[in-house]
Structures are given as C-alpha cells and as structure tokens.
C-alpha cells in the first residue's frame, strides 16, 4: 500500500472534510455488523467439483457476514456469503429489498461470494441469461442477506475506522504452469495449450503468473476501543481439504472464528464479526507444486491457513491509524461484454466426441463436460451486461468485480488506483466465470477455455479501465 507522510495525510483529511473544528467534532461515524445463517438442508447439491453431489453432513455452518458503515450522510454495506458463486439476480433482489426497508441505495451495497468449494449451489442455469424467477434456495439466500443487513443496521453505533495491510506470501502459489510434457497440456477442444492448471511435479518449468501477497483489512471499533468488525482481503482461491458431500465455509469461516480469539475479544453484545473476502485469486491457490508436503487429515489445512491469516491481521492492527470520522462514497455501473460463441468447426468436433464408441480412449477427460458447456454458449445471447462497483471509505478504495479475477488484474488496479489504499473483491455482484488477461488467454489452460470463461478475450482490459475511471471519479469527489 502507498504510504504518505503525516503532513500529506493531515492536508488530505482537511480537504476531505472541509469542516470547521466545531463542525468536525459534531460529525459522527457509525458502524454495525451482523451475520445470518445460510446453510441449506441436507440433500442440497454441493458444487465446486466437476460433479455436484448431495450434502449428507455439515462440518460448519454457512453464513452471510455483513458490515454497515454510516458517515451521517452516506451508508455503505459490505456483505460476504459463504458460496462458490452467486448470480446477480440474487444480489439484485437483496439490494432491492434492502433499499425498500432501509433506504440504502443499491449502488451503496456490495455483496460477494467467498468461493468456498464446499457449499450448496446458488447458481442459475445459464450465467449469461438473467433468470426470470429465483429458485427456493436463491430466495432464501436473498432474504438472509437482507436479514444480516437489517440486523447490522440496527446495531449501528459511534465507531472508529481504520485500514492497513501486511504481507503473507507463504500460502500463495500460482496454479498455472508451463510444463514440458505435452500430454499434460491437452485441452478438451482437441488441441494443446502452453500452460496447465494444477500440473504434476515431474515436468514443471515455471509459473505463468504472479501472486499478490498483500493481506488487506478494514477495521472498525467502538469509541471505547471494543472491536466491532474486520473485513479482510486475501488473494487465495480457497483451501479445501473438505470431504465430498460435506458442507463447509472453508478457511473463510476459520478466519472469522480465529480472529476473535487473536484479538482476545470478550463475550459481548453485539458480537464481533470477522469477515474474509476473496481478492483476485482466479489463478492462485494453496498448493506448492514444487514441494507438496505430506497429506493432512480433512479440514486441517483450512484450519492452519485460517489461523495464520487471522494472526497476521491481528498482529498488524495495532499499527494502523483509526479515524473518528471519514466520508463514504460509492459508484456502480454496468458494462456490456460480448459472449463467446463456438465456431462451426468446434461444434462439429464435439459431435464427433459424443459419437465416439464406448470404451474408446478420450483425448481429454473433460471433453464431454465441455461439449455441454459449448452447446450452452452456442444458444446464449450475443452480449451480457455485468455490474461493476467501487466503494470509497476515506482514502481506501474497494473494487467489486463479478468474475474469478486473475491476480495480475488486481495488481494493476492497485498500482493505478488514485486513492492511498485499494483492494479488489472478486465474485462481487454476480458470478460470470473466470477473467484472464488477453496475454493469459493466449497461453490457454483451464481458466481460458470456452465454457470456463464466457466473455470476450479483452474483457479484463475493459473492466480495469472502467474500474479505474470510477475510482478516479470517487477521488475527485472526495476533494
């Protein structure tokens, strides 16, 4: 994060507020936080693997974790849901209901999925088509988001707010690799890529992209110093180690639980709420491909990572500056992107795949899956409209992008953001698949395949440009 000398911070603070000392003293900043349970009944399909399986056990409950901020004129909402990815229809329904009940504008409400791979499905049939009606779980999820916001709003109290970051690179590994063995680089379209996701160790050459070690966080505490909530951000896809058919919020829930312990939060009402959002982790996971280490029992790795990330945030919190008041602002826009469609040759190839006699070796183990995905895209609309959002909390900017975003995109946004500090929350406002850069598209690999990625190949550049434009506007308005 960018660091400014104290004089610049003081000048910027005066410009931001434009208040006389008496007026500044009267201004009150408030915060409130809450959770609501979104665990489905047993039998709900768990998504995150190649084949959805019905849940038969709950290891830990799924939640919406929510923070509401109020500067006296503007209110912002940040809500994270334990789910692999939630379509915009669900978030839009929640926004509308919150606006009706609490008069908080839709553009001021940021909702996102954590991307746990051991939660029930909230997906629609086709991400490029808006569903006309929510299914039962989607309705339940939207209502529970609203419940969390309403409770957090009811708990608003005078508060101090601060933000900061610490680096924690030990748990981050780019999962896309250049590998020597051609068989490892086959794709389900009958071709050969340059890179492979999650490769075997034997022919590793080098990773295809960077990681972002920055662990960012926003913290609020009461005027007497009682911790109220923390929203952290880490660019790690998820951890896993959860048996099939078992519901779990993954390390995101471990973080929430362990952070309260690390901060030595005493039993209190309202309870402290720890929130961990997913950064730009579309190509980053928790596997050290050069040294995989020993196998661990179920749930052990997510406990280790959640505990570490919580400890690192807790260690960094005493060093941040808290403010008794900062201004809030938000921007939201919609961007029209072209939907990828298969060529006639591609469709013909998959017809041959489907006609292959039983027992004949497949070129790629997932070619039938992609035959279905490509067929769906062939019947999809030519364009899709995706929501983009940016929040400003004092000199902190938060970007919200409805894709599984490659790390280098988040790094570019951080580098060019005009505000002092910045982080991106992915899978926010919707869930449209992976978002590689054009350069990564050229390398191939799982995240770039049609059906995994659904939009035009330069979408990341358009989204980054639009996001920085909104941030520049927020910056200008703050002066």
Image (tube, helix red, strand yellow):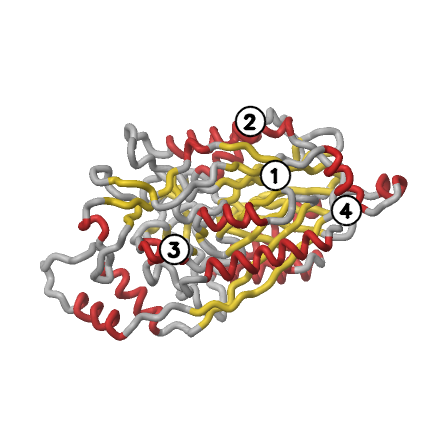
Which residue is tagged 4? 16
Mark 4–mark 3 Cα distance, whole angstroms, equals: 39 Å
Q: Residue at x 36, y 48 (%)?
A: 55
Query: Which callout, 1 or 2, points at the residue further toward the start of the chain?
Result: 1
Left or right of 444: which side holds 270? right
302 to the left or right of 466: left
> Looking at this view, is 57 or 119 the one in front?
119
**Residue appearing at x 52%, y 31% in the figure:** 310
Can residue 473 be seen by looking at this rendering? yes
What whole-number distance in Å separates the C-alpha atoms at marks 4 and 2?
A: 35 Å
Give how far apart the Cα atoms at labels 4 and 1 are. Answer: 18 Å
Q: Name the residue under label 1.
A: 2
Residue bearing mark 3: 439
- The alpha-carbon separation of the residues under discs 3 and 1 comes to 27 Å
User: Residues at badges 3 and 1 in contact (C-beta under 8 Å)?
Assistant: no
Quarter of the image for residue 345 reads bottom left
Q: Quadrant of the N terminus?
A: top right
Residue 261: give its label. Answer: 2
């Amino acid at each position: 994060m960018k660091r400014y000398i104290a004089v610049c911070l003081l000048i910027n603070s005066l410009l931001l507020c434009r208040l006389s000392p008496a007026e500044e003293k009267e201004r009150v900043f408030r915060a409130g936080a809450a959770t609501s349970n979104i665990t489905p009944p047993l039998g709900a399909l768990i998504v995150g693997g190649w084949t959805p399986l019905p849940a038969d056990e709950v290891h830990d409950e799924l939640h919406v974790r929510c923070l509401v901020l109020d500067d006296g004129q503007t209110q912002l909402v940040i809500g994270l849901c334990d789910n692999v990815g939630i379509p915009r229809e669900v978030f839009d329904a929640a926004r509308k209901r919150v606006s009706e009940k609490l008069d908080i504008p839709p553009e001021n409400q940021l909702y996102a999925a954590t991307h746990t791979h051991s939660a029930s499905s909230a997906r629609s049939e086709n991400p490029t088509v808006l569903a006309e009606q929510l299914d039962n779980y989607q309705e339940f999820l939207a209502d529970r988001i609203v419940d969390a916001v309403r409770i957090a709003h009811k708990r608003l109290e005078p508060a101090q707010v601060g933000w900061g970051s610490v680096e924690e690179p030990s748990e981050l590994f780019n999962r896309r690799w250049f590998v020597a063995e051609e068989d490892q680089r086959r794709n389900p379209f009958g071709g050969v890529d340059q890179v492979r996701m999650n490769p075997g160790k034997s022919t590793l050459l080098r990773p295809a992209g960077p990681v972002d070690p920055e662990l960012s966080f926003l913290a609020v505490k009461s005027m007497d110093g009682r911790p109220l909530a923390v929203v952290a951000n880490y660019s790690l896809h998820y951890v896993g180690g959860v048996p099939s058919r078992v519901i779990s919020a993954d390390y995101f829930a471990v973080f929430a639980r362990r952070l309260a312990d690390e901060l030595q939060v005493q039993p209190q009402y309202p309870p402290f709420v720890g929130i961990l959002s997913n950064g730009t982790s579309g190509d980053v996971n928790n596997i050290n491909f050069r040294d995989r280490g020993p196998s661990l029992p179920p749930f052990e790795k997510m406990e280790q990572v959640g505990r570490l990330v919580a400890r690192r945030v807790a260690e960094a919190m005493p060093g941040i500056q808290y403010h008794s008041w900062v201004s809030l602002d938000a921007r939201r826009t919609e961007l029209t992107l072209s939907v990828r469609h298969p060529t006639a040759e591609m469709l013909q190839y998959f017809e041959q795949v489907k006609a292959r006699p039983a027992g004949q070796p497949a070129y790629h183990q997932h070619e039938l899956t992609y035959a279905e995905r490509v067929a769906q895209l062939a019947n999809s609309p030519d364009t899709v409209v995706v929501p983009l959002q940016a929040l400003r909390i004092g000199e902190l900017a938060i970007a919200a992008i409805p894709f599984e975003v490659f790390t280098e995109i988040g790094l570019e946004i951080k580098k060019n953001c005009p505000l002092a500090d910045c982080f991106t929350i992915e899978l926010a406002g919707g869930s449209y698949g992976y978002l590689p850069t054009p350069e990564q598209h050229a390398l191939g690999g799982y995240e770039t395949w049609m059906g995994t990625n659904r939009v035009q190949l330069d979408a990341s550049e358009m989204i980054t440009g639009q996001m920085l434009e909104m941030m520049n506007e927020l910056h200008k308005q703050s002066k």
